[in-house]
Image (cartoon, rainbow, N blue to C red):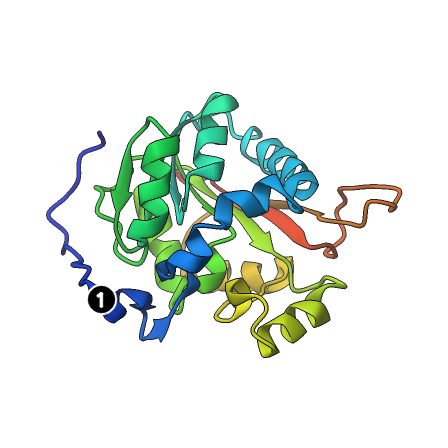
Amino acid sequence: MKEITDRPTFELTPGSELRNWQGRKEWFFNRDDTDRYEQYYEGPYKRQEVWQKRTLEQLIKKDARVKTLLEFGCGTTRFTRWWHEIGIEATGGDISPFMLAQGRQLFGGDLVMADSHHMPFKDHTFDALAFVTTFEYYQNPVQVIREAVRVGKYGIVFGMMNRNTPKLIRRKVQQAIGRNNYYVTATFYTPKTLQALIREALPDRDYTISWNATGLPKWFPTQQWRVPYGDFFGLHVKLNDV
């Protein structure tokens, strides 16, 4: 287990309060939603998951320095397990005890329950940080990016739900009629808006950014491109000044 610092601990209280984080109700504190998470990936999301993983692997493998990785917002460890499959030693972190309880049953590696705004690890504990469809839920994303480069020595890889998607209207309708709790508190980014946040968070760092979009319709002639449109994009921040 990676060494944890004496940073503040975060107590989770029982009952209805457990459904709240950052002053609002979140789906990942609701057992009705978290219990369906793995089923969702095994069902209608399966084909998209294949392309998401392919996109993220292409990005992270460009930096041969990355051998260890901390995935925050790991949930049920769906992607945490996969990092190991491609040769990266991964640890998972999440704020939700319900998600981590499932992850413990599915993943044999290290897991930690903590808030991504205050990661309980020493500087440069890992080679990289990963956020896969979780960064969209942070109310202080600049602070999270700064924490990520503190703990992850060589950079960050993001897997993001893209705002530039034909499905945006459908997402909004689902939110409005209560058909999809996963999107209610999410902030959708584009490669451009995410890069603006990174510039704000890391004004004095030397880094290189690369990205690719995927999540395109099955009938489309390509499933991955350097155009900022599609349901999902991966973005890698490679730190050069270390």
Find residue 205 and report its horizontal and vertical position in percent. 42, 51
Depth check: 19 or 35 in front?
A: 35
Looking at the rendering, in which quadrant would you find the C terminus?
top left
In this picture, is 200 found above or below 176?
A: above
User: Tag 1's secondary structure?
Assistant: helix
At a point 35% along the width and 55% down the height, the residue shown is: 146
At a point 69% along the width and 55% down the height, the residue shown is: 231
Residue identifier under label 1 = 15
Q: Seen from this angle, which residue lies furthest left? A: 6
In this picture, is 60 found above or below 139?
A: above
Query: How dense is the environment of label 1, judged by Cα within 10 Å: few (below 14), some, or many (20 and up)?
Result: few
In this picture, is 96 found above or below 14?
A: above
The image quarter containing residue 67 is: top left
In this view of the protein, can residue 233 be seen by the observer? yes
Find residue 122 and report its horizontal and vertical position in percent. 21, 41
Q: Amino acid at mark 1?
A: Gly
Q: Is residue 94 left or right of residue 219?
A: left
Find residue 127 and report its horizontal and vertical position in percent. 38, 33
Q: Is residue 114 left or right of residue 191?
A: left
Depth check: 45 or 39 in front?
A: 39
Looking at the rendering, in which quadrant would you find the N terminus?
top left
